[in-house]
Image (cartoon, rainbow, N blue to C red):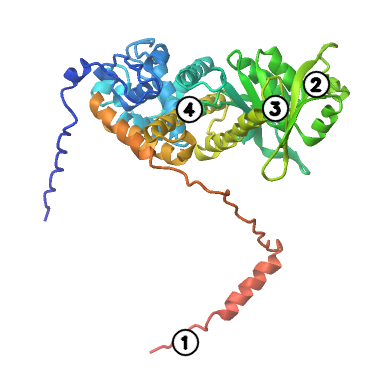
């Protein structure tokens, strides 16, 4: 007998959802911005009130990127995947840890449908969930437009940050590598690592990252091959990336960058530098230096830095009169080691050491970008698409960092006291998966998400956690081991019960 199914009860209307037309006439003052000003008065209409546009309004400010996200910028009225929609969906893929194209299209149709421009298919809910149109839109998108979008997002955060040293921006340099899909195009552009049997499988790309110390935002990295005839190095990449920094910045890097060529490229780009030196390089340089100050736990020297013979062989383009006036610092650390620094800034040794201690923060930023957000696993199979996914990974990382900064300000703690992974999960669950609502309701949801993220504090440990490495015995590769184990398992099995016949 067929039984009629009970109809699904209609969800009661939320008390937060009031008249949308009335809400849109009210002034929208963003109480959560760093500058406590109505920075995000973008005049969004009801057709643009989606999670995507509201997140950008709250975290970035639509005025900064409005010309790139304008839904009217399309070739014809039938076009659905406009430039702004495609950029946001690329960011959404990386926010969701490398979601597939089908998952991304399904998410937007379910939660961000009003992100699309006015179109009969979107209004009548007949827009196909097939990701082929979105895939074609990704291919049409220009890399320079994504780069400009990322620059404006990062620049928007920087202008609202508190200055540290005379209002100047401080950037931390570090490098890393990622592996890509083993396609013919990517293998040619980024040759794999060689081994004793020839060439390995996975293409290897070398990334140079510049992270801003005030906001934690990461600029678009410098990407070059690590192996092959066109291989690059950290010194070459740093010479390119310092050209992209804002004028008058301060650049900090570890001992791998503490060489003459990197310091000179930084000065030629109009920036100051604070680099760490290796012990051997410091001892070689201090022989020609003059001591200017000495105190408890530190010594400072002045040096007219000239390139060595090795520096000139590695950089034949250096002019004959190349030289830098620098200061060397030797500072005693609490663990008994010594910190060796070189800089052109007129800082005291203790102040320079305290400022340099922030450089280690970029190690955690790179880990969060590569591992936590899984930016090291890109699905792209072409060079251009791999760069697009990498750029949007950086944008997604910066949005999460800004969300953590606002949550930390609400909780009155330092941003790095909050767990990046926890803030990222809350960002996904509470902001990306919300239902359509009016602006006041979304503002309440955003505030609750910030309050919840402010509770995800990391413990203050006196010593970092340490896990001892355990060496596991490796089994023999011969089949004798497997046969012996099979024999033992057969011997331990009980005899089967006798089968009787009636």
**Between marks 3 and 1 in the image, the one whose residue lies nearer the viewer:** 3
Proximity of marks 2 and 1: CB atoms separated by less than 8 Å: no
Q: Give the camera-side residue of 218 and 260.
A: 260
**Between marks 2 and 1 in the image, the one whose residue lies nearer the viewer:** 2
Residue on which disc 2 sits = 303
> How many dots with numbers?
4
Q: Residue at x 54, y 28 (%)?
A: 390
Outermost residue toward the right in this view? 309
Q: Quadrant of residue 342?
A: top right
Proximity of marks 3 and 1: CB atoms separated by less than 8 Å: no
* Distance from Cα at disc 2 to Cα at disc 1: 93 Å
Q: Residue at x 44, y 28 (%)?
A: 402
Label of residue 275 in the image: 3
Picture layout, residue 148 above or below residue 351: above
Q: Name the quarter where the C terminus is drawn.
A: bottom left
Dot 2 or dot 1: first in sequence order is 2
Circle 2 packing at 10 Å, graded few (<14), some (14-19), many (20+), is: some
* Distance from Cα at disc 2 to Cα at disc 3: 15 Å
Q: Secondary structure at mark 4?
A: helix
Circle 1 packing at 10 Å, graded few (<14), some (14-19), many (20+), is: few
Q: Give the camera-side residue of 103 and 474.
A: 474
Q: Quadrant of residue 20?
A: top left
Left or right of 491? Residue 259 is right
The answer, for residue 228, to whether it is visible in the render is no
Left or right of 147? Residue 66 is left
User: Residue 113, percent across and down?
Assistant: 30, 26
Dot 3 or dot 1: first in sequence order is 3
Residue on which disc 4 sits = 398
User: Residue 423, percent across and down?
Assistant: 42, 38
Label of residue 498 in the image: 1
Dot 2 or dot 3: first in sequence order is 3
User: Residue 230, percent across and down?
Assistant: 73, 24
């Amino acid at each position: 007998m067929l039984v009629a199914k009970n109809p699904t009860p209609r969800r009661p209307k939320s008390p937060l959802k009031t008249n949308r037309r009335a809400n849109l006439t009210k002034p929208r003052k963003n109480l959560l911005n760093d500058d406590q000003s109505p920075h995000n008065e973008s005049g969004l209409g009801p057709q643009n009130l989606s999670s995507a546009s509201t997140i950008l309004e709250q975290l970035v400010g639509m005025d900064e990127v409005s010309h790139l996200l304008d839904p009217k910028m399309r070739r014809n009225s039938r076009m659905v995947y406009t430039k702004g929609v495609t950029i946001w969906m690329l960011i959404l893929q990386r926010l969701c840890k490398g979601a597939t194209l089908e998952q991304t299209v399904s998410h937007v149709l379910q939660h961000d449908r009003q992100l699309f421009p006015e179109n009969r298919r979107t209004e009548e809910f007949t827009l196909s969930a097939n990701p082929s149109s979105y895939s074609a839109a990704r291919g049409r998108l220009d890399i320079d437009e994504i780069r400009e979008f990322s620059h404006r997002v990062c620049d928007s955060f920087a202008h609202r940050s508190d200055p540290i040293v005379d209002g100047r921006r401080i950037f931390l340099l570090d490098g890393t590598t990622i592996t890509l899909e083993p396609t013919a195009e990517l293998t040619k552009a980024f040759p794999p690592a060689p081994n004793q049997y020839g060439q390995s499988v996975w293409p290897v790309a070398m990334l140079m990252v510049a992270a801003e110390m005030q906001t934690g935002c990461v600029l678009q990295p410098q990407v070059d091959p690590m192996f092959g005839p066109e291989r690059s190095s950290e010194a070459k990449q740093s010479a390119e990336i310092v050209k992209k920094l804002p004028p008058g910045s301060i650049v900090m890097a570890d001992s791998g960058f503490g060489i003459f060529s990197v310091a000179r490229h930084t000065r030629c780009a109009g920036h100051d530098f604070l680099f760490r030196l290796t012990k051997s390089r410091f001892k070689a340089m201090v022989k020609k230096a003059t001591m200017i100050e000495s105190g408890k736990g530190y010594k400072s020297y002045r040096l007219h830095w000239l390139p060595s013979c090795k520096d000139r062989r590695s950089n034949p383009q250096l002019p004959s009169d190349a030289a830098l006036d620098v200061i060397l610092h030797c500072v005693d650390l609490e663990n008994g080691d010594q910190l060796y620094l070189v800089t052109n800034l007129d800082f005291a040794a203790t102040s320079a050491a305290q400022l340099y201690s922030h450089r280690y923060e970029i190690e955690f930023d790179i880990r969060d970008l590569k591992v936590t957000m899984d930016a090291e696993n890109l699905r792209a199979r072409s060079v251009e698409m791999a760069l697009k996914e990498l750029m949007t990974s950086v944008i997604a990382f910066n949005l999460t960092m800004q969300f953590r900064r606002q949550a930390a300000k609400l909780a009155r703690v330092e941003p790095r006291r909050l767990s990046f992974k926890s803030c990222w999960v809350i960002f996904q669950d509470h902001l990306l998966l919300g239902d359509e609502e009016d602006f006041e309701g979304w503002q309440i949801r955003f505030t609750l998400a910030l309050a919840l993220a402010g509770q995800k504090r990391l413990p203050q440990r006196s010593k970092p956690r340490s896990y001892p490495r355990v060496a596991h015995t490796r089994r023999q590769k011969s089949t004798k081991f497997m046969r012996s184990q099979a024999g033992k398992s057969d011997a331990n099995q009980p005899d089967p019960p006798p089968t009787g016949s009636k």
